[in-house]
Image: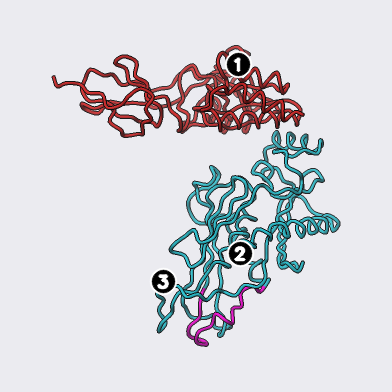
């Protein structure tokens, strides 16, 4: 067996198609794939090397559905057996009747009574098949239809920054603006409060998205909100 | 129509706040750049907030129309690129693209800003044909105003190419310009819940009740009007909207001083 070689270092920025390593002693993980002897990048982002495992933390690109993610989706179609939901990714997800409600839904019931076209729902991904068919469920704590309020779209890779460590950022925005905020892993954020508060929260969220690479971000945003309020 | 969004925006308007906290008669940050396309005789890039359009002006030679033997021609084409919005699809132009092209065209044509008689080279045989092509780069609302501003800026930027024996050498440009003296600018005013708003963002465009595009020249003359939306407008509404458009067009016109 030939010798293995690593071409990149930790925290280096890589682009799709870049050869990260050659040889069989490294393993591809999220954002990377194997092609013959080589491991290549499939996303733009920061390199993470954990022992033999090569991983990319994406800095851009569309959301990729992952099992267990709680997302905000938009209902785009009502079928006989359920709803089609836009997930802000390349793949449309399916919410079937049996996962839609804990109540019994009889055959032939008017499904728009539950969710109509254009409704936003907080939902959870139960399964993503190898063919990228996405299944959703509404059974779970807090999963519901999102009534009124407004939706903000952000880069889904910045969602961890918006939530902050143990939710520190999002709870700070909630407390200082008095808005109700729900962050979906797919980059859609639901904000509800009085019009003025909502605008402030939206501006804070957009600021986080823009300045996510600065250190002491929570302090910066808190300062921003305080000066804005005055 | 998205009624949930409409109710939400109405709630804002009841509190005299817009969806992005602008004033009702406030434009987003607007910028004009000219000479952005090398292969066009005149070009401009207009940004209104995150909305962006690129406009190119091309000169061609051709035969005049039989009923206007000594006049050149002008046409406007709008391409709503699928890249600029998830709502646009590739293919032949749809209702929105045709409407935009016609409103921009009407503004330029009816203001008589281009002297078509001067575009005649040999009567009945050879005239200049001007094509104004508008491409949308990003749609964040108010594409129509951006297109109108862009079309005018590109016309101001345009220089005739060298013409010899009925053929054009596109590689060489003369210093001769179109000689544009007037500045027709379209300003769209929309009405939601009895409030008049300029420069709508995409969300406001989705829920508008009625809209009026007013194209005016700097001396306050109206050269084109276009009404859209589902609900009617009263005479009083229209005169209010025209007043707003006149005031706003003065503001936008200041941006053009940099170009000349």
The colour mode here is: by chain
Residue bounds of the magenta highlight:
B112-129
Q: Chain of mark 2?
A: B
Host chain of mark 1: A
Residue B44 x, y percent position in the rendering: 54, 59
Residue B152: which numbered mark, if any? 2
Q: Looking at the image, which residue is at 62% across and 59% down?
A: B149
Q: Which mark is residue A168?
A: 1
Counting from the top left corner in percent of width and height, residue B204 is at: 69, 43
Q: Colour of chain B?
A: cyan
Q: Is residue A175 part of the magenta span, yes or no?
A: no
Q: CA distance from mark 1 to mark 2?
A: 50 Å
The chain that hosts pointer 3 is B
Residue depicted at x 43% and y 28%: A58
Q: Is residue B41 left or right of residue B144?
A: left
Residue drawn at x 69%, y 27% is A225
Label 3 Cα neighbours within 10 Å, binned few <14 / some 14-19 / many ≥20: some
Q: Which mark is residue B170?
A: 3
Chain for colour red = A
């Amino acid at each position: 067996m030939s010798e293995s070689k690593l071409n990149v270092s930790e925290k280096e920025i890589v682009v799709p198609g870049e050869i990260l390593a050659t040889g069989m002693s490294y393993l591809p993980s999220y954002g990377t794939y194997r092609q013959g002897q080589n491991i290549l990048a499939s996303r733009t982002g920061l390199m993470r090397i954990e022992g033999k495992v090569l991983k990319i933390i994406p800095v851009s690109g569309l959301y990729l559905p992952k099992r267990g993610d709680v997302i905000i989706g938009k209902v785009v179609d009502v079928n006989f057996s359920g709803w089609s939901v836009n997930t802000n990714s390349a793949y449309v997800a399916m919410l079937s009747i049996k996962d839609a409600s804990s109540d019994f839904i009889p055959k032939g019931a008017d499904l728009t009574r539950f969710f109509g076209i254009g409704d936003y729902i907080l939902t959870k991904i139960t399964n993503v098949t190898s063919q990228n068919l996405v299944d959703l469920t509404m059974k779970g704590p807090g999963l519901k239809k999102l009534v009124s309020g407004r939706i903000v779209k952000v880069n889904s890779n910045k969602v961890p920054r918006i939530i902050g460590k143990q939710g520190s950022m999002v709870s700070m925005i909630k407390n200082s603006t008095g808005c109700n905020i729900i962050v979906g892993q797919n980059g859609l954020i639901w904000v509800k409060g009085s019009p003025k508060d909502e605008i402030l929260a939206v501006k804070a969220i957009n600021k986080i998205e823009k300045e996510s690479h600065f250190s002491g971000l929570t302090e910066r945003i808190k300062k921003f909100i305080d000066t804005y309020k005055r | 129509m998205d009624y949930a969004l409409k109710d939400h925006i109405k709630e804002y308007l009841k509190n005299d706040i817009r969806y992005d906290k602008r004033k009702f008669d406030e434009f987003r940050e607007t910028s004009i750049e000219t000479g952005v396309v090398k292969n066009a005789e005149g070009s401009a890039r207009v940004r209104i907030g995150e909305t962006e359009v690129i406009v190119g002006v091309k000169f061609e030679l051709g035969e005049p129309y039989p009923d206007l033997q000594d006049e050149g021609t002008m046409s406007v084409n709008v391409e709503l690129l699928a890249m600029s919005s998830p709502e646009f699809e590739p293919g032949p132009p749809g209702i929105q693209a045709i409407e935009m092209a016609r409103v921009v065209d009407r503004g330029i044509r009816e203001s008589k800003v281009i002297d078509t008689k001067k575009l005649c080279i040999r009567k009945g045989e050879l005239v200049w044909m001007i094509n104004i092509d508008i491409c949308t780069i990003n749609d964040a609302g108010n594409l129509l105003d951006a297109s109108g501003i862009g079309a005018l800026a590109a016309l101001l930027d345009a220089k005739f190419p060298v013409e010899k024996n009925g053929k054009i050498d596109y590689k060489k440009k003369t210093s001769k310009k179109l000689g544009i003296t007037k500045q027709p600018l379209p300003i769209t005013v929309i009405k939601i819940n009895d409030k008049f708003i300029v420069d709508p963002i995409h969300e406001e465009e989705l829920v508008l009740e009625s809209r009026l595009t007013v194209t005016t020249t700097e001396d306050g003359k109206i050269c084109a009007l276009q009404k859209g939306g589902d609900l009617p407008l009263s005479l009083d509404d229209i005169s209010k909207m025209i007043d707003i458009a006149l005031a706003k067009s003065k503001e936008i016109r200041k941006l053009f001083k940099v170009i000349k």
